[in-house]
Image (spheres, rainbow, N blue to C red):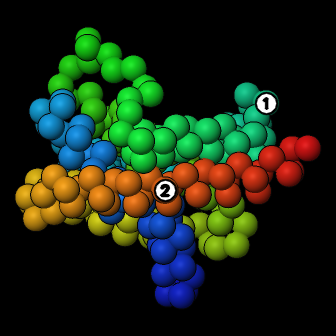
Amino acid sequence: MELNIKEIFTAFMVLFAVIDIIGNIPIIIDLRNREGSINSKKASVISGVIMMLFLFIGDEMLKLIGIDVNSFAVAGSFVLFFLALEMVLGVKLFREDDNINKFSATVFPVAFPLIAGPGSLTTILSIKSEYTTESILIAIFLNMILIYLVLKTSYKIDKFLGKNGINIIRKIFGVILLAISVKLFMSNIQELI
């Protein structure tokens, strides 16, 4: 097996852009402040496992429940759209459950759908036709290392940026996420019509 470094790098960058862990720092800091703690290692491992499983069984899983990739992507675009609205407008659209224990934020919403969400899972399915499975696996693994580092240092990043810096980044990445959701919707709705 010969590894294609260019292919690995390209798959890594595509996933990195879609996962957008840097853009999610404000959300992670909000969750950490609200929930008390996020287990960085557990969140990275769980999201990595979800993405790797989806690489191998994603197509079959969607077919089994009668959903095509385009429908999955359109549904994902709505989730991204509402998350982006929260970031840009500073409002809460999703109801918080007071019965959730403090450590559940590690799995939901950090590992899924924030990191291993509709955007990254759809991306994995679409790059699967262009790149080898080994290259995608390595790209996922490299992204998980980076995600772990960002999650682990989010307090330091929070102190460095401050409240105003976080709010500015949140709004900027909210607009970017809004654009990504519209693009995801438009490119996939055409396939469905």
Task: Give the amino acid type for the residue marked by disc 2 in the picture.
Answer: Val
Mark in the foreground, 1 or 2: 2
The quadrant in which residue 2 appears is bottom right
Left or right of 175 on screen, residue 145:
left
Badge 1: how crowded within 10 Å, few (<14), some, or many (20+)?
Answer: few
Nearer to us in this view, 183 or 4? 183
Return the mark for residue 176.
none
Question: According to the image, label 2 marks what residue?
Answer: 175
Number of labels in the image equals 2
In the rendered image, the residue lying farthest to the right is 193
Q: Image quadrant for the N terminus?
A: bottom right
Question: According to the image, label 1 marks what residue?
Answer: 66
Badge 2: how crowded within 10 Å, few (<14), some, or many (20+)?
Answer: some
Sequence order check, earlier mark of 1 and 2: 1
Residue drawn at x 21%, y 20% is: 101
The quadrant in which residue 161 appears is bottom left
Residue 28 rendering spot, x and y as whole percentages: 26, 46
Task: Give the amino acid type for the residue marked by disc 1 in the picture.
Answer: Gly
Distance CA(mark 1)–CA(mark 2): 32 Å
Residue 9 rendering spot, x and y as whole percentages: 48, 81
Residue drawn at x 52%, y 37% is: 82
Residue 54 in sight from this viewpoint = no
In the rendered image, the residue lying farthest to the top is 99
Residue drawn at x 30%, y 59% is: 168
